[in-house]
Amino acid sequence: MSSERSDPASTPLMPLTMATVGQRVIFVRADGGCGLTHRLAEMGLTRGEELEVMNRGPGPYIVSVRGGRLVLGRGMVHRILVYPT
Amino acid sequence: MADGRQITVALAGNPNSGKSTIFNAITGGRQHVGNYPGVTVEKKTGRAVHNGAELQVVDLPGTYSLTAYSIEEVIARNSILDEKPDVVIDIVDSSNLERNLYLATQVMELGAPLLLAFNKSDLAEARGMAIDVEKLSRLLGVPIVRTVGHKGAGIRELLDAALAVAADPASASARQNLPHYGRELDPEVSKLAEMVPQNCRRAGRDRWVAVKLLENDAEAIKRLRAIMPADEFEKLLAAAAHSRRHVESVCGDSAEIILADRRYGFISGACQESVRSGVEARHALSDRIDAVVTSGVFGLPLFVLLMLLVFQFTFSLGGWLTGQLDAAKELLSAGVSGLWPAGADSPLRSLLADGIIEGVGTVLSFVPMIFLLFLAISVLEDSGYMARAAFIVDRFMHKIGLHGKSFIPMLIGFGCNVPGILATRTLESRRDRLTTMLILPLMSCSARLPIYVLILGAFFPRRAAFSVFGLAEVSNQALWLLGIYLTGILLAGAAARLLRGTILRGEAGSFVMELPPYRMPTLRGVLVHTWQRGWMFLRKAGTVILAAVIVLWALTTWPKPDEEHTRRFDAQRLAAESGLPAGSVQAEQTLRAVDAARREAELEHSAIGRIGRAIQPVMAPCGFDWKISTALIAALPAKEVFVAQMGVLHAVGAGRRADQPLTARLRAAYSPLQGISIMLFCLVSLPCIPTLAATWQESGSWKWALVQVAGLTALAWLIATAVYQIGSLVVS
């Protein structure tokens, strides 16, 4: 992973499940309806916001966003799209 | 001494922001907990007097925002809209500033006069955060006071500031700097705001309505529909839809997402100017602890260990205390009984000694165990561990269609099902909430423990099974108990899957949970939380059970057997008294036996005995006779009553001193297989009436309580029957 910010336009999106522990990624969006993206946005996960993966279980993930820690259920982590920094 | 000024204050804030602590600090003990009309959300209000003014304080539900996603958010929002408090204090967790300020922006959008309490400022400092409060206050246009809630620091200054805002709310609101939404959205907001009816225009409310329309907020739309003439409303709705489409095509995301984004942009900007983070808080102590606590290797074992400790603590210390209370109850019962001459047949004496003291006393003797369990849970919750526990169990919960958040109500259910059901409020999705509620009674509550103890004592005498590291001995009884509890848990899992596959089909709600940093629980906080839950159990004992015990007592006392019966037993008594030396041990025992046999006959003759006999054919496949069936019915109001009733039915009388003879009687009357069948039936069946009432209340409909009763009873019958029938085949 290059330490410089990659050009967003050319970096492929990946689901959060592909991120490793300790990796910092940029949130893009969450696929799937039911207001998921909105709820995440309200919890601080907005487009372009950086998050760090603190822990990835076989189940939910713990991520660090805006100085706080969030637990994201497994159903969500599959649907969250990010790109690496 | 109040000078007549009356101020209304609303407290808002994220969960975990320390709002409750500040509410308690402001109102002291002067609080009242009620319900918002029509819903089961708690309404906490309190009073305080400060600098001569009287403050009415409302503690709004803790929320992350004021969108209409959850009922708490709707309630919080409507409280501000309808009750128009003179000042809204938003309690902000300073160590988690940006996310906490999101709610603040929403309160500002409502046009409410806002005061910010930057709570946990000690934590923020410890993390190396330097917040220029004056600058931030200027940027937001909102007064800010630093507080450290759990130390009570800053409360006085907070109330001073609150009074200042409340003195002129309109100016306070006008001074607030609302977020700009960007050049795509701002014009749309303005356009829609102009179409908003006159009666919504005060204090920036028109802009708020416009924003809600843009967000397609169902609640706001509903309220508008009610106050606007139909054609104007349709026009407004159409304009809103048009704006939404426009925004989506230009920005690529739906309007509500952009709006959330812009609010955070505003917050970020303000924070960048006024907050300096010292050393990155990235490897704070909490994270280091979490690296172990939530790790794949240590997480689960640590969790299991903690749960074992909790239960060990509850059962051993609690069990001992329960024994003490039981003995006290005996004394009281004997004392009251002694007020009447021996052999007297007084209904009042019977009601008091055998009914009320026995019934309610048994229930109250469980108070220690329940409070200890809730104490342990409060410590785990207040320290922040519970959130980690939910994280750890989530992957197992997921297999049965629930999530980690359901774990906490279930854990509480082991103490008493009633507060467990109430705790399901924290689950946002209605389907999750209902599923958890319906299976909760399978978490074997402490009321059933005496039943297991009785049966195990009768059929599986205590023997050491094996020892752990040569330190502690695990008895066979302990293993049986563990087995029963585990059966309950496994059945709960199966039931959840079944429900999810049939009547509660659908996607599991999304699991997003904030992980608060660890903190040291305060003694006061823990005690308050313990009390809040334990109180529910006490209230149940004081009201429902008391009423039910009286009804039950009536059903067991009447109809009385005829004259012939009375004469016969009186004659027996006389024979015993005259035939044996007065006061001798033998005389006492014989008299007691005569009295007990008489009571057994009376019970058989009574209403409840008849009901027991009537349902006997249905219960026969489970291996139950009419006595067991009768005791089960008697245990409807509260399971604890089962043991007492069995005592009466086997002519031993109630009470702990009767335990030995009762277990002997049971061993003589029934087989171990029947004992197992009874335990299983009690584990699964017929949740007690207070539990049903709680389910009815929380689910909002009697139908769900009915599903719970019918489902669990049917399941209990099936399992007991299966075990008994198959067991009989195997044994013979």
Image (spheres, helix red, strand yellow):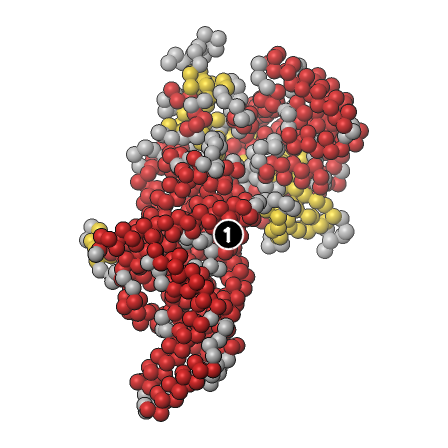
Instruction: For the N terminus of chain B, give its image quadrant.
Output: bottom right
Q: Amino acid at mark 1?
A: Leu
Q: Where is B731 relative to B354, above or below?
A: above
Q: Give the number of marks.
A: 1
Q: Residue furthest right?
A: B198
Secondary element under disc 1, as helix, strand or loop, is helix
Q: Which residue is mark 1?
A: B692
Nearest to the observer: residue B606 or residue B203: B606
Location of residue A23 in the rendering, given as x and y in whole percent from the top left corner: 39, 21
Nearest to the observer: residue B50 or residue A31: A31
Nearest to the observer: residue B377 or residue B552: B552
Instruction: Using residue B183 as the reference point, say whether residue B389 is left or right of it.
Output: left
Nearest to the observer: residue B32 or residue B420: B420
Location of residue B439 in the rendering, given as x and y in whole percent from the top left corner: 43, 45
User: Crowding near pointer 1: few (<14 within 10 Å), some, many (20+)?
Assistant: many
Chain letter of the residue carrying label 1: B
Location of residue B289 in the rendering, given as x and y in whole percent from the top left corner: 37, 36
Q: Residue at x 21, y 56 (%)?
A: B732
Q: Residue at x 43, y 25 (%)?
A: A77
Instruction: Using residue B26 as the reference point, say whether residue A32 is left or right of it.
Output: left
Q: Residue at x 38, y 20 (%)?
A: A18
Residue B409 visible in rendering:
no
Residue B545 visible in rendering:
yes
Q: Residue at x 43, y 77 (%)?
A: B334
Q: Where is B363 relative to B715, above or below?
A: below
Q: Where is B575 relative to B322, above or below?
A: below
Location of residue B630 in the rendering, given as x and y in whole percent from the top left corner: 42, 64
